[in-house]
Amino acid sequence: MIEIRDVSKWYGSFQVLKSCSVSVARGEVVVVCGPSGSGKSTLIKGVNGLEPCDEGEIVVDGLNVGVKADLRVLRTRVGMVFQNFELYPHLNVLDNICLAPMVVLKRKREEAEARARTLLGRVGLTDHALKFPAQLSGGQQQRVAIARSLAMDPVVMLFDEPTSALDPEMIKEVLDVMSDLARDGMTMIVVTHEMGFARRVADRIIFMDAGEIVEVRPPEAFFTAPESERARAFLSKILEH
Amino acid sequence: MGHLDVNVILRNLPYLWEGLQLSFLLAAIAIAGGIFFGLIMALLRMSSIRPVAWIALGYVNFFRSVPLILVIFWIYFLVPLLLGHATGPFLSAVVAFTMFETAYYCEIIRAGVQSTPKGQISAGVASGMTWLQAMRHIVMPQAFRKMRPILLTQSIILFQDTSLVYVVTLRDFMTSVSTVASQELRMVELYLFAGAAYFAICFAGSRLINRLDGGFRR
């Protein structure tokens, strides 16, 4: 489904990604973790071309991120959820969800709205369709953002630290929605520090450090017996509190 | 100083109204044209293609560095030389105002766009929109909401600046007032009236925009 081959990227003379290679199968849930500045977000944003890579190639569902004509089609099939939600503040919840399907997929308003209402039910926000983002809690906003991505009927969902900007009591409601999605067979790449979620939901863990993919392993193996010294150091820091 | 003669204003009202209509028409065209071309100029100014951005920057810097009255003169006297025939004072004033105001509206719009968080474009682009679609549906509606007060200020200034067209023989509101004032030798009445009229128009304009603004507030 997703092939990442020898991807490297530089910001000026600083190398943020060092020939990263990994593939993700259809229906698989992969969690990317690692210390800040390890290149997790850059890697995931490479998958939909928000951060173009300088070397190597990324292919999603047969579409090459580096080919301009492929990229637009690819983006309609790859949903992305951002750390800061990035809901459109001037539009209500329903219009937030309907905008891209109407503008990009040329769906009719009624069709887009019907789909949006179904998705709002799925994320548990049926009663909030006409509210504006500023009237919602962080957790609700992020669930709307997930519904907004799903409205494009994506084959892959990317999550870039979806719970990092949330108050602790709201993290669970977002993770629950993501777990449901995983159970329904969505292919997902999730950058997160939520190790409980990773352990329960992920099929594999990608551990990154200093721009390199250091380990790619099933969660049990990764958490109980990390191979590398760097992963051990990282886990000891985040799991001990 | 004797008593104020209100009749002098009433007597000359049709003449003054003609001048005011010219001011309104010129301001309306220049505001619409300035915002339209200012928007295009702002998009060029933010282009990732360097030479395009430089040309737009050059345009803005040039027109912000010369007085409007000079631009009005230039267009009036130079364009006929280029075209080989006279364009008439009104058309040349419209062109001069639009070109001049484009530079100011461009900078207002650019600032508004750049105050919108970059993540908003990313969200649009990530869902398959082109950059222009994301601008049109996501960034511009937010930016225009933020820009409204300063767009209004600029438009009020523009309206007041229409009085400069007397230099190309056009008779706007202010010129009409001056003419009547000197013909009737009633300076006090006419200039008080002019002040009241400008105040009423500009104040009403800002109230109207606030009213519209209220409709969007939430």
Image (cartoon, rainbow, N blue to C red):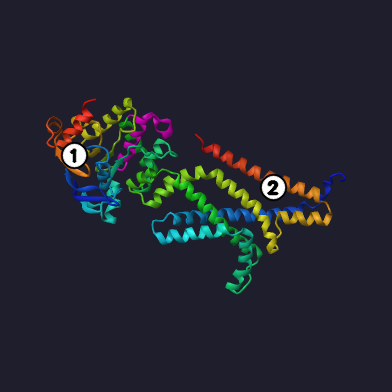
Residues A176 and B108: in front is B108
In this rendering, does residue A131 appear at all? no
Task: Say which chain tag 2 marks.
Answer: B
Q: Pinpoint residue B116: horizontal percent, then vertical percent.
A: 43, 44
Q: Nearer the viewer, mark 2 or mark 1?
A: 1
Task: Say which chain tag 1 marks.
Answer: A
Left or right of residue B164: residue A151: left
The residue positioned 30% from the left and 41% from the top of the image is: A80
Residues B176 and A96: in front is B176
Q: Residues within 10 Å of mark 2 (few under 14, many from 20)?
A: some
Q: Which residues are magenta?
A: A124-152
Q: Residue furthest bottom?
A: B84
Q: Helix or strand or loop: what does disc 1 sit on?
A: strand
The residue positioned 73% from the left and 45% from the top of the image is: B196
Residues A64 and A150: in front is A64
Residue underneath mark 1: A206
Residue underneath mark 2: B198
Name the amino acid type tagged 1. Answer: Ile
